[in-house]
Image (tube, grey):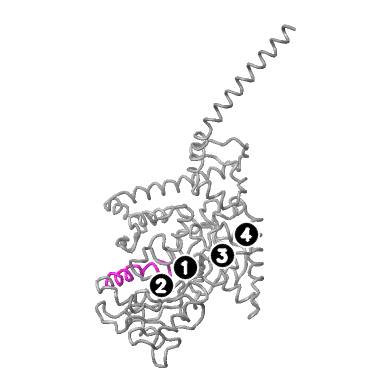
Amino acid sequence: MEIHHHRHFFSAILLILFLASFTVVFILLPSNLMSFINKFESSFSASLHHLQTKVSGENDYLLAVEFADGRSNGTVTLPKEVKKVKSREKKREEGLAGARSAMRKAALGNRRSNLTRSSTPYNDDGYIPTGAVYHNSRLFYQSYLEMEKIFKVYVYPDGDLPIVHDGPCKDIYSTEGRFLHEMERGVGKFRTNDPNAAHVYFLPFSVTWMVKYLYTPSSYDITPLTQFVSDYVRVVSMRYPFWNRTHGADHFMLACHDWGPHASKGNPFLYNTSIRVLCNANTSEGFNPLKDVSLPEIHLYGGEVSPKLLSLPPENAPRRYLAFFAGGMHGPIRPILLQHWKNRDKDILVNEYLPKGIDYYSIMLSSKFCLCPSGFEVASPRIVESIYAECVPVILSNYYVLPFSDVLQWEAFSVQVDVSDIPRLKEILSAIPESKYKKLKQGVRAVRRHFTLNQPAKRFDVFHMILHSIWLRRLNIKLIS
């Protein structure tokens, strides 16, 4: 009996000690866990919260990762082949971490420290971004240099012409086709044929060609588009390991057609998780500027910019009209504009259709401000046409995320007017001092290179700005500071 009592006594002591140690661990756990999570997050280009949000909680693929300092989380014993892949991933993530560090230093550093980086072999024209048109020109420049150094894109080879690997280059959706052609056939340094070396993966289908070849006119049935996208994602997810690794978080699609967002609904992860590069950048229709990219709409008649926009009048040449717009009455905003200003004022030239003998671009070149109202969808090619004409864009839109707004400070080269203030347009534009107008016009001239389609592509042009926007999403860093 005495032995039995002793056993109970020692058991009670052990239980008390166990509970006490458990309590101490439980009390200390939050700070240690937060430290662990911070280290865990710092090992990835995207934060843990960001990935968890993107994958809707299904983050099983994170279980077997290795940390940046070489430690394993110990949950899985990795085969030799997987270890090689993880080693490549680790090296790639270390490169991204180095880019982030250089960007942070540039954001806080002085101008001279950035100029020393201009000796990069890619610095073909000596251009260095400066001025008020950028949120932070030093940070943007450093980010661009880091992108040139390491960024790699893998283009999936699957799919057949014309819907995949091709796109329009001679109409209102030219940005879509020209990017596809440059990515597929250009001589740029960003494409890699080694998928294990890529930072992002491009799904090279054309939504515009889907509409042309799969859609039944006037049916308003977009099922063929969503089905094509669904089938394409299923094929690449079955043939390659990359989609399933992140549920498409490091994949991107690009579409300038109004129905691009609808087509992306063919796969829920593509819609909610992947980077969608869209002209129709409408936040009220699911566009998420934290992961999606706003694509400028550029109308190329016959595949070229109008010669009239290539030879501009002298900088100080007078501009006859205060503001100009001509276009069809569709969507909710244009009817308001036409109702208040069509043929109402000699200084604000607003027409649904220009009279015969009057040239659209000639009037644009004779106007100080060009009105850019949304139609049925938010994007308008008038914004880029205005920039080409050095006519200060006046943005009349709701829910529109303007292109490259991570980098560009649109207030420095455009005017944004609330739709409710359309009746006061003349009052608002006339109140802008001449000195401010000249600065706005100078800003328009400064950003033109960022909206120019070159063939082949040139540094800092629209192709590279699109890539840079994708690069930022891969880094999970916003450049506004």
Q: Nearer the viewer, mark 4 or mark 1?
A: 1
Q: Is residue 244 magenta?
A: no
**What residue would you read off at disc 4?**
268
Alpha carbon of mark 3 to alpha carbon of mark 4: how far?
Answer: 18 Å
Q: Position of residue 205 (x, y in %)?
A: 58, 67
Which quadrant would the C terminus be assigned to in this image? bottom left
Q: Is label 3 in a helix, a strand or a loop? A: loop
Q: Is residue 455 magenta?
A: yes
Label 1 sits on what residue type?
Tyr
Q: Is label 4 in a helix, a strand or a loop? A: helix
Q: Residue farthest to the right?
A: 1
* Left or right of residue 185, residue 366 in this image: left
Establish if 247 lies above or below 460. above
Label 3 sits on what residue type?
Pro
Alpha carbon of mark 4 to alpha carbon of mark 1: how far?
Answer: 23 Å
**What residue would you read off at disc 3?**
204
The image's mark for residue 395 is: 2
Per the rendered image, the range of residues in magenta is: 437-459
Q: Earlier in the sequence, mark 3 or mark 4?
A: 3
The image's mark for residue 400 is: 1
Q: Position of residue 291 (x, y in %)?
A: 51, 58
Q: Nearer the viewer, mark 2 or mark 3?
A: 2
Q: Earlier in the sequence, mark 2 or mark 3?
A: 3
Q: At x 50% / y 77%, what residue is drawn?
A: 332
Establish if 330 lies above or below 26. below
Alpha carbon of mark 2 to alpha carbon of mark 1: how far?
Answer: 9 Å
Label 4 sits on what residue type?
Pro
Q: Earlier in the sequence, mark 2 or mark 1?
A: 2
Q: Is label 2 in a helix, a strand or a loop? A: strand
Alpha carbon of mark 2 to alpha carbon of mark 3: how far?
Answer: 31 Å
Q: Are marks 2 and 1 in contact (CB under 8 Å)?
A: yes
